[in-house]
Image (tube, helix red, strand yellow):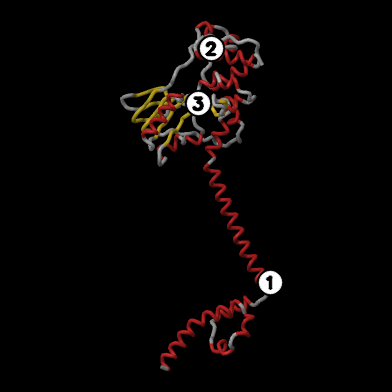
Amino acid sequence: MFRCGGLAVGAFKQKLVPLVRTVYVQSPRLRNRLPGTLFQQWRFPLELQMTREMASSGASGGKMDNSMIVLIVGLSAIGAGAYAYKTIKDDQKRYNERIAGLGLTPEEKRRRAESSTAGEPVPQVRPPSHVPFLIIGGGTAAFAAARSIRARDPGARVLIVSEDPELPYMRPPLSKELWFSDDPNVTKTLRFRQWNGKERSIYFQPPSFYVSAQDLPHVENGGVAVLNGKKVVQLDVRGNMVKLNDGAQITYEKCLIATGGTPRSLSAIDRAGAEVKSRTTLFRKVGDFRTLEKISREVNSITIIGGGFLGSELACAIGRKGEY
């Protein structure tokens, strides 16, 4: 019986020791409330004695410890925020560059590039050496084909090679809706109001929809890349290879030619002098719209050669604009 009681007391003592130690270290003021025999019999290690002395050093020591903790936490938060900010900026650098260049003419883009920091190398987009799907041309048919390929194969990699410096866009608004816009900066925004009253851009998709041409082979889920300002000068149908105007070569598995049409100039205008040519412009691209819109604000009369859909729409739009 006494043996069992001794074992029970020993077990209770082992459970009570950590509790009393904790109370003693954290709250020295409770020392007088606890039985003196316990503190006399137990021997604390040197570490606990030092901790007890540090804890009982007064209010100034506590303030110093708290200040150090706040300083460490603050520096850690600042470092994490700086790292996150740098990562986000690097990821969105390409997106911001495309957004900034959407409303610029090729001449403005060239001037902006020339006005950049002297000595800073201009990054060149390297086309991939091989793509599963290659589309020559960057118009409506090219974009519709790329979208259909991706709909059938969500992991497909499609490369569009376009001589146009712009991303794929809708051409009909160039001769209709854009001319009826009340926005004085319509040549930069290229936004118009649809028949249902909603406003949208002439571009089929924003720049974030596309992936970089040089990253296309490495994108996990594929995507659509546009190689702007490049022209296919040679097509090898036997070797499944195209050559660009800068000498780059791209092999492909399947190729679609969707270059669209080009306005046909008159031989009489081609043989005319520089004065006549300076007052004549073709109409097909965004740059042609910007040029003609500027001319319509500077002259009193405009002659349109061609009576098809495009010519008739332009005559109606420019005539309506001249009434105001």
Amino acid type, callout 3: Tyr
Residues 172 and 258: in front is 172
Describe the element under mark 2 as helix, strand or loop: helix
> Percent position (x, y) of residue 317?
58, 16
Amino acid type, callout 2: Ser
Classed neighbour count for the residue bearing mark 3: other residues with Cα under 10 Å, few (<14), some (14–19), many (≥20): some
Quarter holding the N terminus is bottom left
Measured Cα–Cα span from mark 3 to mark 2: 21 Å
On the rendered structure, is 118 left or right of 222?
A: right
Residue at x-position 38% and y-position 26%: 242
Residue bearing mark 1 = 60
Amino acid type, callout 1: Ser
| Contact flag, marks 2 and 1 (Cβ < 8 Å) | no
Q: Earlier in the sequence, mark 2 or mark 1?
A: 1
Q: Residue furthest left?
A: 238
Describe the element under mark 3 as helix, strand or loop: loop
Residue at x-position 51% and y-position 27%: 166
Residue bearing mark 3 = 169
Describe the element under mark 1 as helix, strand or loop: helix
Residues 243 and 278: in front is 278
Classed neighbour count for the residue bearing mark 1: other residues with Cα under 10 Å, few (<14), some (14–19), many (≥20): few
Classed neighbour count for the residue bearing mark 2: other residues with Cα under 10 Å, few (<14), some (14–19), many (≥20): some
Nearer the viewer's eye, disc 2 or disc 1? 2
Image quarter of residue 122? top right
Residue bearing mark 2 = 312
